[in-house]
Amino acid sequence: MVFSSLTFIYLFLPGVLLLYFCVPTKFRNAVLLASSLFFYFCGEQIYLLLMAGETLLTYVAGRLLEILPDKAKKVTLAVFLVLSFGLLGLFKYADLIPGTVNGLAGREIFTLLRLPLPIGISFYVFQSVSYGIDVYRGKYPAEKNLLNLSLYVSFFPQLIAGPVVRFETVSENLKYRTHSIARLSEGLFRFTLGLGKKVLIADRLYAFCDTAAAAASPSLLLSWTEGLAFLLYVYFDFSGYSDMAIGLARCFGFDLPENFDYPLISTGFREFWRRWHISLGSWFRDYVYIPLGGSRKGLLIHLRNLLTVWVLTGLWHGASLNFVLWGLSFGIMLIAEVLLEKTGLFKKKKIPAVLKHILVLTLTVLFFVWFRFTDLRDALTQYGRMFGTVPLWTGSTAYLLKGFWVLLSMACLGATPLPKILYKKAENSAAGRVLAPFLRSAFIVFILIFVTAYLVDGSFSPFLYFRF
Amino acid sequence: MLKRSIAALPALSFITAVLMGTVTLFAFPKKNISEAERRPLASAPVLSCKNVMKGDYFEDLDLWTADHFAGRETLRHLRFLFQTGILNENEYNGFVNHNGYIISLPKNINSSSIAYAAERFNAVWERYLKNSGSHIYRTLVPDKSSFAGKWGYPTIDLDLMDQLYADSLPFAEAISLRDILSLEDYYYTDSHWRQEKLTPAAKHILEAMGRDSSLLDGDLETDSLYPFLGVYAGQSAMDPDPETIYWLKGGYLNELKAINLEIRAPLKIYDPEGCDPKDLYTLFLGGGLGLIRIENPDAPEGQLVIFRDSYASSMAPLLASAYRTVYLVDMRYAHPDVYGRFIPFENSDVLFMFSETLMNNSQGIR
């Protein structure tokens, strides 16, 4: 089940909200856990046991890591990490090397396991691992209530596509949380905003990319527009999902961390990754980059650490070579940024921000070509088109740009903070303070009607980040 | 208190809107078919252990919810308005509206479909035509989309389509209709062509087959029926105005006699009263029938066999002007095994007349 489905919006969500607010407070976590398990079961029947196993493993590991002596703790943590990452490795990466070799050879040298990827496994394994490591480090005590820990691992708003939540972020909320009509309004507004971003913008951007890719006469201009549209699609799809997750969690009294902060306005790659998929970036920073020494052990170690993190980030997104290349591309850019800063060439005042922004955006569009095509030949064909193997302009270009310029303009504008700034400004005015709830209500109804209109007409498409 | 109530407005709006959707989803009676889209709607999911454990139940529930949502047609039209009005997109579900003509734009040529059709045509040729002494012709009915290229709409490669059709019928002589027809020869809301505008095309085909087409110059008049909403009206969700469907009558057409060979029953050439009211184009020769014979007592000796799809239903009465007997074979409804029981193929003219749409979706050919 995905959030952008009629079944979720009109059957599951009202049912859970009704049940949640009708039962006494002490049963609310149980209601949320049961709802989360049912939500997961709708999409993954047998693999529900896998998630339950990982949760139990995390619980036992947490308790042991708290009570065992130091030496035994290390062994316990190692076993826990091997088992957790082993699970991820088996289901996500078992076919990576044989598949790549087969692909490069053009024939099946190795037989592939072809295990279906359990939905959300990358998210719940990373959450479990962060919990285990933090308990080992003594950052917080192990959770003694299995129900609470299970809810942390399987909380349906963020279970299948993040954000990657740390236990410390929600541990208080698991025990005590406040509910108010204002928070409910805020949460439902945020959910609706994300729903609109996903269904009315991201899915249409994807339709543009699809149509452009199949255009009878591709052109250089169309290929670059397609590249930009794909980047915008990923942004709206994933940030839309994060908005929905944050909004839903708020309805139930939880405060999830922000996952996106207008990454497409960045003027550098480090800034980009501080703004894009923030929860994953901070996970890799805290559990890989810093333990490896970060930037404190000399330039070479620093560069090695950057490369390691970015190869792993690429691999996290998918078990194929294109994602590794995608991660490597960003890793190399981050290394280049570090080196340029050391030479003083990339310092703030030397290059105008607008030029840096254009450079970062252009390269990001290029790197996301790797992200889009699992088959490297398709990616190379697209790069060829972007660098002139096709005419500058064709009839297909005119037709498609005429049909999608409004959407593309809206998406470009919507990827900047401008709409939010304008809205906040209007909301803070005297009239705005009075009208804001009415405007929000109208916005909610408008978006719900048009989202429903798209969903009844078969525009259903799963979230991109499902496959991670 | 007032402030608190106002703060609750967004939540109340959301909950009210969602609950209205939920309640109406279950409260409204359910239909089995969508008349607008002309397709069966999803049936209710079956709750069983097997279905639930395989996940089929939840997938079926998604489909059922989408198909039976209250006000579905209005919502589809709203989507059309949003997509073309606010987002200013050219297409909606692959449809465009050009000066009132609703056109479905195919994205590509389905070569495997054409290969399958070729294989079926070849089987018929080997079995019935190879040694029959017949003259064999082929004509491809252009889709409305094939005229759209000149206005900038993306179209399939028409030369390639013609070539693939030619390759699928290597034993047949070509008769091209591309230069004879125009978009105005088709209905606004339907995929089909208009019979009253087909006389030049019919004469072109007859002359290419060496037949006398003079009966078509006789006193023919038109009759009509209103309102007519074609297949694209509902599929496109554009909510167009109804139009009028026309047919030719008078002259030799009044003398034509048709028979449904499969049940050996007389058949009306035009049946505006008895046709499917949801698809008025079925008024031509009863719509989808496998084997039909038309007799024209006013025509010279000669027999024509048309292997065809629905476009021929309106064309065949015009081609019958030059033949005493015309057989129509719809390969989607009649199995090749039975052709020989009803049709003497010897020394006939044989015309393969299929639309681009069918060639691109030929799975139904038997």
Image (tube, coloured by chain):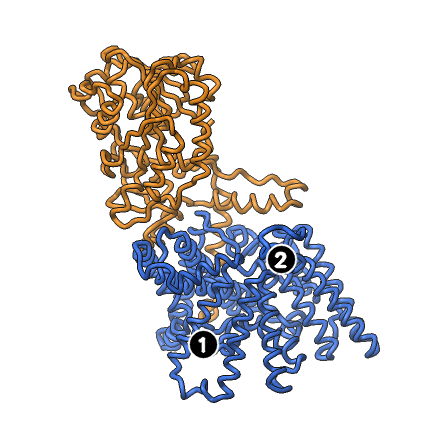
**Residue A338 x %, y %:** 53, 83
Question: Image quadrant for the C terminus of chain A?
Answer: bottom right
Number of numbered discs overlaid on the protein picture: 2
Helix, strand or loop status at disc 2: helix
User: Does mark 2 fall on the same chain as mark 1?
Assistant: yes
For the residues marked 1 and 2, what is the alpha-carbon distance in whole angstroms? Answer: 37 Å
Side of A189 relative to A159 (left or right): left
Q: Earlier in the sequence, mark 1 or mark 2?
A: 2
What residue is shown at x 43% (from left), y 47% (from top)? A457
**Disc 1 sits on a residue from what chain?**
A
Along the line of sight, the residue nearer the viewer: B326 or A465 = B326
Chain displayed in blue: A
Q: Can you give x and y, in whole percent of width and height, for residue B117 in the image?
A: 44, 31
Decide: few, some or many residues near mark 2? Use Cα within 10 Å; few <14, some 14-19, many ≥20.
some
Q: Return the residue at label 2.
A: A101
Check disc 1 and give the amino acid type: Ser
* Front residue (pair B62, A328): A328
Chain B color in figure: orange
Q: Chain of mark 2?
A: A
Eyeballing the image, is B238 above or below B202?
below
Q: Tell me the kind of residue under disc 2.
A: Val
Mark linked to residue A266: 1
Residue A339 vertical position relative to residue B320 in the rendered view, above or below: below
